[in-house]
Image: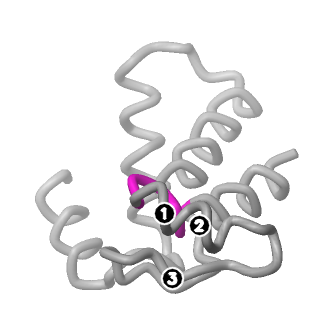
Amino acid sequence: MLLELAVGDAYGAGFEYADAGMVMQYNNLSRYVQHPRHRLKPGSYTDDTQMSLAIAETIVAGEPWVSEVLASRFVATFCAPALFWAKAQLQTFFCLISV
């Protein structure tokens, strides 16, 4: 299920907040597309997938469902080794200031 979520997220990332004309022209399920304003590489997943992974890890670990645990998991997932969509500099800066 998480794999399908990541694939759908990566496909939809090219269209998120894009104008309707662009969506109508390219949304045919034939390929990943470059977002018109973002520099996210086509086919890369987003923070939506990262947050879903963090939630799944919380559930599997049997941790309490409280905001502090979820926030900690979100940060840990974001600070994991560089992910496809994250800029290393931003990731490093965020992880240093959140410790």
What mark, if any, has residue 54 been given in the picture?
none
**Which percent across, then down, holds residue 41?**
51, 85
The stretch in magenta equals 13-18
Label 1 sits on a secondary structure element that is: helix
Q: Earlier in the sequence, mark 2 or mark 3?
A: 3
Residue drawn 75% across the image and 50% down it:
5
- Residue 38 is left or right of residue 6, and the answer is left
- In which image quadrant can residue 54 be found? top right
Q: Earlier in the sequence, mark 1 or mark 2?
A: 1
State whether residue 9 is above or below residue 93.
above
**Which percent across, then down, holds residue 6?**
71, 58
As shown in the figure, which amino acid type bears the numbered disc 2?
Tyr
What mark, if any, has residue 45 been given in the picture?
2
**Which percent across, then down, holds residue 24?**
61, 62
State whether residue 70 is above or below residue 27.
above
Residue on which the image places disc 3: 34
Q: Nearer the viewer, mark 2 or mark 3?
A: 3
Residue on which the image places disc 1: 21
Q: Quadrant of the N terminus?
A: top right
